[in-house]
Image (spheres, rainbow, N blue to C red):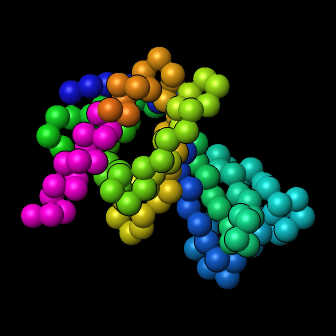
Amino acid sequence: MSKYKLDYFSKYYFYEEDDFVNQVEDGKYILEQIKTSNRFDYKGHSYKYTKFGNISQSDTKRDVNMEIVADSVNVIIDNEECHLDLIYKFETKVLEDHVRVTTRISEKNDDISCLLYINNNEAKECIKELEGVKKLQESYLKM
């Protein structure tokens, strides 16, 4: 088992405007705010319009623990087993202080876009291990 500290871990939930009001607590109030300013931070979440005209809700945590377990298609993020959909999306981009990994995470009712920001000092090894998780996921897909 390998342990890494993610500098940032962000999840992104997307809504059509009509659904947003019904599915999000205080959705009507938040919608009014983002119509005025295009971005609104509220109760630990950030809301904004996307370039496609829908609404995104982002949840970002700092200093998040991630564990990669040998021979597992899942990872552990903050002591919770998670399934990163690395087969479907696994993009990396080198930034000044981090490497950003863009992927999806499966939750009970949805597939959520997420970003992992890995410190440059750990990024090479962490990405190598994530590639191993992806290969394992691909091998199960072919069974």
Residue 25 placement: quadrant: bottom right
Is residue 21 in sight in this rendering? no
For the image shown, how many numbered marks are present on the structure? Answer: 0
Residue 131 placement: quadrant: top left
What residue is at 68 percent from the left and 67 percent from the top?
Answer: 55
Q: Main secondary structure of the magenta part?
A: helix
Is residue 6 in sight in this rendering? yes
Q: What residue occupies the far right of the structure in this picture? A: 36
Q: Give the side of residue 105 with respect to residue 39, left or right.
A: left
Q: Give the side of residue 25 with respect to residue 85, left or right.
A: right
- Indicate whether 11 appears above or below 27: above
Residue 50 placement: quadrant: bottom right
Q: Nearer the viewer, residue 95 or 73?
A: 95
Residue 6 placed where, x, y %?
Answer: 47, 30
Viewport quadrant of the N terminus: top left
Q: Give the side of residue 109 with respect to residue 71, left or right.
A: right
Residue 68 placed where, x, y %?
Answer: 27, 34
Q: Nearer the viewer, residue 61 or 123?
A: 123
Residue 121 placed where, x, y %?
Answer: 47, 17
Q: Nearer the viewer, residue 141 or 42?
A: 141
- Indicate whether 87 appears above or below 71: below
Viewport quadrant of the C terminus: bottom left
Q: Give the side of residue 50 with respect to residue 75, left or right.
A: right
Q: What residue occupies the far left of the structure in this picture? A: 143
What residue is at 64 percent from the left and 46 percent from the top?
Answer: 44
What residue is at 56 percent from the left and 28 percent from the top?
Answer: 98
Residue 28 placed where, x, y %?
Answer: 74, 73
What segment carries the magenta color?
129-143
